[in-house]
Amino acid sequence: MSDSTAIAHGAHDAPEHGHEAHPPYLRHHFENVEQQADAAGFAMWLFLLTEVMFFGGLFTAYLIYRNWYYPAFVAASHQLNIFWGTLNTLLLISSSFTMAMGVWCAEVRKKSGLVLCLVLTFILGIGFLGIKTIEYKEKFEKNHIPGAHYSLNSFLNPDSDDAAKAAGDKPLPLDMARHTEVYFSLYFAMTGMHALHMIIGIAILGFMIYRAQAGAYTAGHVTFVENFGLYWHFVDIVWIFLFPLLYLISRHANT
Amino acid sequence: MSDTIVSLPDQSTARIPKVNFITKENGLLSWLLTGDHKRIAVLYLISLSFFFFIGGALAGLIRLELLTPQTDLMATDTYNKVFTMHGVIMIFFFLVPSVPATLGNFLIPLMIGAKDLALPKINLLSWYLYIAGGLLAIYTMATGGVDTGWTFTTPLSTHYVNTNVLTTGLAVFIAGFSSIFTGLNFIVTIHKMRCPGMTWFRMPLFVWAHYAASILMVLGTPVVAIAIVLVALERTIGIGVFDPTKGGDPILFQHLFWFYSHPAVYIMILPGMGVISETISTFSRKRVFGYTAVAFSSVAIAVFGFFVWAHHMFIMGISNYSVLVFSLLTMLVAVPSAIKIFNWTFTLYKGSITFETPMLYTFGFMGLFTIGGLTGIFLGTSGTDIHLTETYFIVAHFHFVMVGGMLMAFLAGIHFWWPKMTGRMYPEKISQLAAVVTFIGFNFTFFPQFILGTLGMPRRYASYPPEFQVLNVFSTAGATILGVGYLLPVLYLTWSLKYGEIAGNNPWQATGLEWQTQSPPLTENFLETPIMDHEAYDYEWLENQKEKEVASVG
């Protein structure tokens, strides 16, 4: 190994671990495969913890402003399309299911099953983003994008707006109506951050499909698939919180 | 003064081990693509020193401007940019990564008997992120700078300034991810990579301190990241979350920012405290008094550190009840900090103390950190805080903790582990001189600022009333001495790389596992996985070990 005579004290009675049978994916600095998988999984959970803190800042802002500007948040939430929201929730939950099946396929070394599951997850993810685009476009057309062109029309004259009319909104005072912009700021910041995580996830999925076809994850080394699965479920869970907070609660507050 | 404990091998026969982590591979690429924690630590050390001297040069400009009461060196808005960039560079590109990214990176695997950090590629990625962030910060400085202060306070940063807030924010955001990855890597490594026999309570306190700091990095940094994202969105498309005219609240930014940036000061100081635990024990030849208490006090500082952020906001319009609660919680942080200082003092008691350079820096740390910490109580008390905040008292307070505390600890650590990192000793006399010069220069620079602050001189102004000039001249003169004190180590440490005496495995007769392998270590750290069969800081074990084995070098 080297001509050095460094003294590793107590190393003389170190138990011999099997140097002869290293699987190719075992990195040099780990003792064995279990330690490697353990460390990678633990690291992934810690990373998800930082993600929780990252989204936590946004959720805090949402809770504070929702408390302050309750009527504005109620009226603004009526502008979201609950059909698309529900459909998207279904897509995302299904994609979590296919992802979980993918992890299982990798564990039992079913290559074609794994590729199929990853492709399905990929398609469902793209579908989610497509629907999100439709929703964003709707906001854009109604001038509900925060900024210089933000329009208060839907909240000052609810009768002129189909969604507001259907929900039976009463006109908000100008003061309160202006706070709907805060709602949409948070809506775009939160769903935008979530969509960014989806895009990153889908890019990694594409890479994984390519690698899975080469049989990379079905030879016993499933750490990468498992950890990506954790990431994907996390992104799913963020949506599970976003959906009720943005679309559902106080939907019927003024009926 | 008792005799020195330095034990070097016979210089006429000793040589640096032929195979070590430095000589294993050659060429620039072997460094830039390395996964070796020791090489990454060296990369960090070089780049950190670079940023430190940029930040230091900016500090020099600040002190030069404040030599006279008028604004004669630079225009006031230039001055704003200079102190902002000084803060941004020193905090995000020097203090936060300083000890963890260099010494922590180098030593944690060695100390716990592992071959490397758990995630070597992530470790390298974190260095690249740091460099990307740092270069972006330099770029913003070159193209006009930023003048919001390092706190990016809204609505100033979102509405009123036209400087490079976005790019600086992006630089800090990127550097934040570097810090997250370092912390994450440490936590995973400490949990999963300890060698047989290395239980939690046999780990060196250096590792405990880094564990606590890593928790803060992992939990705190993402919050400042999202705060920066919101500032960027506010600036670019005006989303209004922090804009009162649209119903937003600038105070929310303060909460999000300080939720990270207060724990960040513990990210900066805790690893330094870890260094002090090692040096105090080694140069007193005693086990750290109250090992368990010191270990848990690190964790306690990390936990309490998350519940005190609003003490930065006493004059920002938060409610009186918040002030009361946060003032009380702030006082609680003093408890674990005091536990550390008292336990180190008890370690000295009846120890055989020797005064090598790292120990001199350590004494500097203990004195200056205590003053810095005690003045923190003035600022944590809301009544005095209202008088003292935004004055030079606060500048002096955090420079005592950060420069007097953290930088002293950093230098103590660099001097202590330099022989391990390079295999060579630095010249002892001149390094002792540097430690003394630094201490004197530091006190000359920052002690007058306490007096200036109580007299009411506000911070962040380029001019001041003429009656404050005498103390400001003292401070500027001290900064010059301090500058010499920081330049000296660069010179003699560089010199020692080629001409220093061969250090051997364990020049200080210290007990850590890192001292039981060759210097500089092998890429794999140890020939065989070590087994920890004794408690940390067990000097009797070391004596027995020396009797049993004849260590040879080369």
Image (spheres, coloured by chain):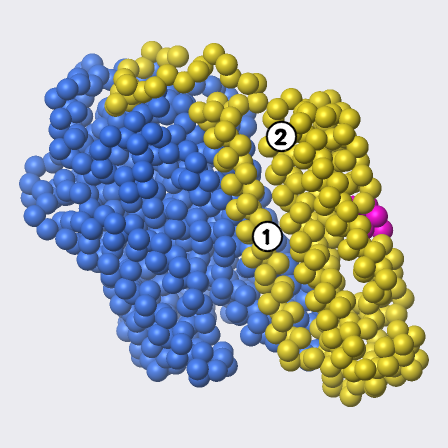
Chain colours: A yellow, B blue
What secondary structure do most residues of the magenta stretch adopt? helix
Residue A208, x across and y down, in percent:
71, 32
Looking at the rendering, which quadrant does residue A137 occupy?
bottom right
Quick one: quadrant of the N terminus of chain B? top left
Q: Name, please, the residue furthest toward the bottom.
A: A173
Chain containing the residue with disc 1 = A
Is residue B210 at least partly visible in the picture? yes
- Three-letter code for the amino acid on which mark 1 is drawn: Glu
Q: Is residue B536 above or below residue A136?
A: above
Q: Earlier in the sequence, mark 1 or mark 2?
A: 1
Decide: is B460 above or below B116: below
Whether B480 is among the magenta residues is no
Q: Residues in magenta?
A: A125-130
Whether residue A129 is in magenta: the answer is yes
Q: Is residue B163 visible?
A: no
For the residue pair B319 and B317, the one nearer the viewer reads as: B319
The residue where tag 1 is placed is A51
Nearest the camera: B35 or B546?
Answer: B546
Secondary structure under the numbered disc 1 in the rendered image: helix
Task: Mark 1 vs mark 2: tell me if same chain.
Answer: yes
Question: Looking at the picture, which amino acid does disc 2 mark?
Answer: Val
Query: In this rendering, would B35 be left or right of B548?
Result: right
Dot 2 falls on which chain? Answer: A
Residue shown at 72%/65% (left/top)?
A: A244
Label 1: how many Cα within 10 Å (few below 14, some 14–19, many 20+): some
Residue at 64 percent of width and 78 percent of height: A67
Distance between the alpha carbons at the discs numbered 1 and 2: 23 Å
Coordinates of residue A218 in the picture (x, y in percent): 67, 24
Q: Which residue is mark 2?
A: A222
